[in-house]
Amino acid sequence: MTVEEVQTELQKMNLPRRLDQPTLENLLRTLRRYNLARPVGRLSGPDSRIEVFPTVLLALPDSDLADAAAESDPHPHRAWPL
């Protein structure tokens, strides 16, 4: 995931402003403390990468995860192989 993708998702929530650099750094510091995510390299621009760990599944309600999966699925009517 990139910083730009995070910004895009936050804009969908109609927040009053964009995520500035100090706030982003504080956010990632908190996520890293709880072993949920970490920056990959330096956070120097919108193309900077963020690694989200599977432990984030423990921090989010199941309904939020289902909604996010449905939004990101490019083939929502495709049956998954068993």
Image: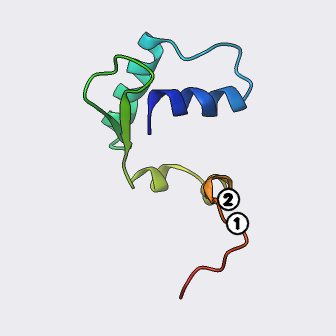
Residue 49 placement (x, y as % from top left): 36, 33
The kind of secondary structure element at disc 2 is helix
Asked if residue 56 is positioned above or below residue 29 in the image, the reply reads below
Residue that protrudes farthest toward the bottom in the picture: 82
Q: Residues within 10 Å of mark 1 (few under 14, many from 20)?
A: few
Give the mark toward the camera: 2 or 1. 1
Identify the image's colour scheme: rainbow, by chain, secondary structure or one colour.
Answer: rainbow
Asked if residue 72 is positioned above or below residue 5 in the image, the reply reads below
Amino acid at pointer 1: Pro
Asked if residue 6 is positioned above or below residue 46 in the image, the reply reads below
Residue 50 placement (x, y as % from top left): 37, 35
Amino acid at pointer 2: Ala
Q: CA distance from mark 2 to mark 1?
A: 7 Å
Q: Which mark is residue 76?
A: 1
Residue at image point 64% right, 59% down: 74
Image-quadrant location for residue 51: top left
Residue 1 placement (x, y as % from top left): 44, 40
The kind of secondary structure element at disc 1 is loop
Foreground residue among 53 and 77 = 77
Image-quadrant location for residue 42: top left
In the picture of the structure, the residue carrying the numbered disc 2 is 70
Residue at image point 65% right, 80% down: 79
Q: Residues within 10 Å of mark 2 (few under 14, many from 20)?
A: few
Q: Are marks 2 and 1 in contact (CB under 8 Å)?
A: yes
